[in-house]
Amino acid sequence: MALFKSSNPEKVVQRDIDAANANRERVSARLADCDQAVTRHLTSAKDCALSGDEAGLDAAQTSLRAAQDRAVTLRSALSEIDRKITDLEHAKAEMADRKLRSETAAEIELLARKLGEIGLEFNSVAERLSEHTHRAVPIVYEALGINNFAKVCLSEVPQAVELVSTMLRAHADAVLAGTAPAKLPLPEEASAEVPAPAPPEDRYRYLPIQPKFLVG
């Protein structure tokens, strides 16, 4: 006897499913044998009736009723086993779903943290870039564009990163709550959902040129 039993719920459920399936095979085999016995006893009862063997007929009918009763009991047991297997499979699917959702939420949280870390690094680089482009503008006017870009990054990127991180964590909460898909979409799936830009509206109406003829 094992001193320690498995505490893994998934393994326990799978063990119960395997045991239930084995039991189903055993009961199914007994039911098949019982159905064959019903057929044999029914044939024997008919033969005894045709031959006038009353004693044999009584024995055959008694065996027939016993086999039929046993078949009913076995079919009932088989239905109960099937219900148990269905319940166990449902429990297994729920466990797998909860595990996947937990892993997905953890992956989203890691992404939010990495985004925050990289955002800080980006902000530091943008500050250094702004410092140098600011000094370069009086010397080279063309540095003004990149200097303005660095200023925009310093003012917009931190807020954008914070917003995205907040939305990521909200999505992780929804995954755990079961209101969002358990799996993360692939990057190519997300890009496929972005609608293509609409063609520019033609504000002008073009009419064919009608030739004019001068009448002399």
Image (tube, grey):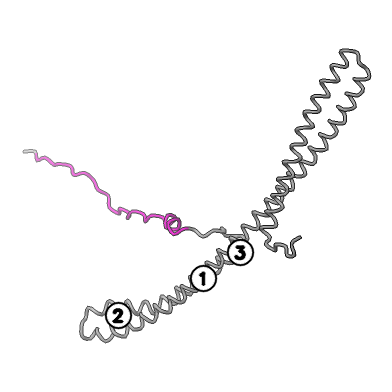
Residue 95: % across, % down: 65, 58
Q: Residue at x 83, y 38 (%)?
A: 73
Residue 155: % across, % down: 40, 79
Queried whether the magenta region covers residue 197, the answer comes back as yes
- In the picture of the structure, the residue carrying the numbered disc 2 is 147
Q: CA distance from mark 1 to mark 2?
A: 33 Å
> Farthest residue in the top direction?
51
In the structure shown, which secondary structural element does the residue marked by tag 1 occupy? helix
> Farthest residue in the right direction?
55
- In the picture of the structure, the residue carrying the numbered disc 1 is 110
Residue 79: % across, % down: 76, 41
Q: Residue at x 71, y 47 (%)?
A: 85
First of labels 3, 2 by sequence position: 2
Q: Is residue 146 left or right of residue 90?
A: left
* Disc 2 residue type (three-letter): Asn
Part of the protein shown in magenta: 186-214
Q: Residue at x 84, y 16 (%)?
A: 47
* Disc 3 residue type (three-letter): Leu
**155 and 189: which one is in front?**
189
- The numbered disc on residue 135 is none
- The numbered disc on residue 176 is 3
Q: Give the quarter of the figure containing the C terminus.
A: top left
